[in-house]
Amino acid sequence: MQNGKTFAVTRNPSRRLGLCLGLLAGLAMTVPAQAEEPDISWGGELFAENCSECHMVPHDEAWFKARAQAGKLDGYDSLRTMVQGCATNFGLPWFDEEVDAVTAWMNETYYHFE
Ligand code: HEC
């Protein structure tokens, strides 16, 4: 579900249709401020744009797969904390929505926590 936050749309124009549908839904009922499914493909884009400087070479796919297997992170919450930590460390002013999307993308791509 789309909640119609405009910054998401300006960063990802392909979601514009979803925004319109979300606004229509919003007219019919009060949309809660959060607790939506994170947008996994948007998370992948955010990661490529903002995180891949360090996490491509040598921190590429193989690195994350090895890290995931090493089991340093013990669950989805730890992964989210790490995503938030890296984003904060490297000066990205991310909202929860971005952190959630990237966490979901990383989880689907590498970690596979419940
Ligand atoms: C300036 C380089 C740099 C950038 C930019 C960076 N990271 Fe990291 N990241 C690191 C380093 C170094 C580590 C390893 C820390 C350690 O050894 O515990 C790490 C570790 C991680 C881990 C934990 C891996 C594991 O399983 O232990 C995650 C998840 C992560 N980064 C996500 C991100 C995300 C998401 C972004 C973009 C917001 C990002 N990083 C941006 C340098 C970076």
Image: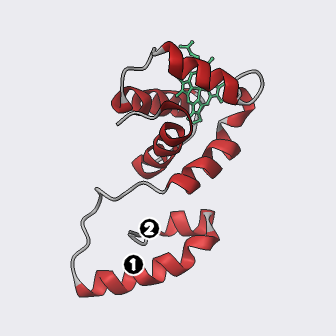
Instruction: Name the residue type under label 2.
Output: Lys
Check disc 1 and report the residue beneath it.
22
Residue 5 has which mark? 2
The residue depicted at 24 percent of the width and 66 percent of the height is 32
* Secondary-structure class at tag 2: loop
The residue depicted at 60 percent of the width and 25 percent of the height is 65
Instruction: Name the residue type under label 1.
Output: Gly
The residue depicted at 74 percent of the width and 30 percent of the height is 56
Provide residue 13's location: percent of width, then percent of height.
Answer: 63, 71
Locate ligand 1 by image quadrant: top right
The quarter of the rendered structure image containing the C terminus is top left
The quarter of the rendered structure image containing the N terminus is bottom left
Q: Using a 10 Å C-alpha cutoff, classify the residue at mark 1 as few (fewer than 14 neighbours), some (14 to 19) or many (20 or more).
A: some
Q: 99 above or below 76? A: below
Provide residue 74's location: percent of width, then percent of height.
Answer: 37, 20
The residue depicted at 46 percent of the width and 33 percent of the height is 84
Q: How is the image coloured?
A: secondary structure
- For the residue pair 85 and 111, the one nearer the viewer reads as 111
